[in-house]
Amino acid sequence: MAGVNGEKLKRLRAWVQNYEWGRSGAEAEVARLLALNTGAEIEPNKPYAEFWMGTHESGPNVLVEEEGEEEEEKEQQDVGLKEWIEKNPKVLGHKVLEKWGSDLPFLFKVLSVGKALSIQAHPDKELAKELHKMKPNLYKDANHKPEMALAITEFRALCGFITLQELKEVLEDVPEIEELVGTASAKQVMEIDERGGDTADKAKTALRSVFTQLMSASKEMTTKAISKLKSRLLLQSQLRSLTEKEELVLQLEKQYPGDIGVLSAFFFNYVKLKPGEALYLAANEPHAYLSGDCVECMATSDNVVRAGLTPKHRDIQTLCSMLTYNQGYPEILSGLALSPYITRYLPPFDEFEVDRCILPKGSSVVFPAIPGPSIFLAFVGEGKMKTGCWKGIVTEGDVVFEPANTELVITATTSELQLYRAGINSRFFHGQ
């Protein structure tokens, strides 16, 4: 698999994480991809959560031997992608090397979400360095983790804080929250004049106070408040239709009984992505993925600060102090059509972009040579890949690393071919 710079394209064996929130093997896209990519046998009742493509030490990828390369690679069984890039740094391109060193700056994933992930945020670089130094067993690296989720199926998430007006409505309509945060904190929010010049600052201060009080409530008080909330909503559901957020809160209570994350869901925007829509998340923004399958890309990091909807370690103090407390609905990306077949999703982060490519049978598309590396995932279908001096077959489940400065032509053969590509954000190269 040779590129125009003489480097070969490399097929990769991906890594899977079986976190307990994953969908079951019988229905998870992650399980299907794992079976196709590695030949692994799938356990129908086991959760399959994340399919990792990249170099992060918590889920490293390995190069797959090509036919005809046995002699050449006999001595190099199971060479890791990270190790191979370190030995062949020019595959990253000189601009990427200069900025990020000899490692892939992004981590590419597919997620199959069966039940809610924790309410979480990812630290910025400064905080990541501090957390990694203080608690290296919990925070495994010193990098920030901006990320983007691109929906494959309908994908639901909680993301960012609701507006001041919505927050006032929540405090009026959900008495159980006021019981936990106290009348004084609730009053502080209710009395903010939305027409005042310093409204945004006052709203952030009040929101920080009320959210921190809520997340810090004792286990006993939390359990009692959630029990009252559940009884009240079940009673009211016989008299009126519950709101979407109320229905969601009852679902979350079933998944995580007595968890403070059930109540804190009222503070966040409830986002439903249609297939082909994307959501990006900067550092220090709260979120929780709820259900569905998505392609996800992020800076190479696995740092997560959790505070609710989780059996894992919670770091409530860190989470409440790190958040930006920005309010309002997040920006949804519909992507930029590069051609009839390729849609590009460009978040405001240098480390990555994602392309979604849907090729009808018999059609071809050219991915021009660019100054950085890419990873391609064949999601559905079969096709041919062709570079300057190589031709090969790509089938669903294949993951391919493409070195910098390599032009690639892809043709769909037997049926429609769906591909996803992750690469360095093209704005980084164009200085925009």
Image (cartoon, rainbow, N blue to C red):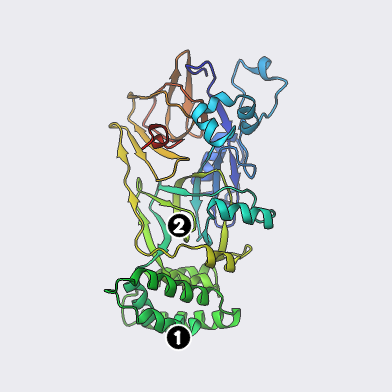
The residue that disc 2 covers is 291
- Where does the image place residue 387, in percent across and percent down from the top left? 45, 18
Task: Say above or below: 417 vs 56.
Answer: above
Q: Nearer the viewer, residue 229 or 370?
A: 370
**Image quarter of residue 269:** bottom left
- Where does the image place residue 114, in percent across and percent down from the top left? 50, 56
> Is the C-beta separation of discs 1 and 2 under 8 Å?
no
Total labels: the figure holds: 2
Type of amino acid under label 2: Ser
Q: Kindly identify the residue that appears in the image at 54 percent across and 49 percent down.
A: 144
Type of amino acid under label 1: Ala
Q: Nearer the viewer, residue 305 or 356?
A: 305
Task: Say above or below: 251 vs 346.
Answer: below
User: Counting other residues with Cα less than 10 Å from the Cα at mark 1, is it few (<14), some (14-19), or many (20 or more)?
Assistant: few
Task: Say above or below: 183 vs 302.
Answer: below
Q: Kindly identify the residue that appears in the image at 40 percent across and 63 percent down.
A: 326
Q: Kindly identify the residue that appears in the image at 52 percent across and 19 percent down.
A: 1
- Position of 312 with respect to 330 (left or right) is right
The residue that disc 1 covers is 184
Residue 402 appears in the picture as rendered:
no
Residue 260 appears in the picture as rendered:
yes
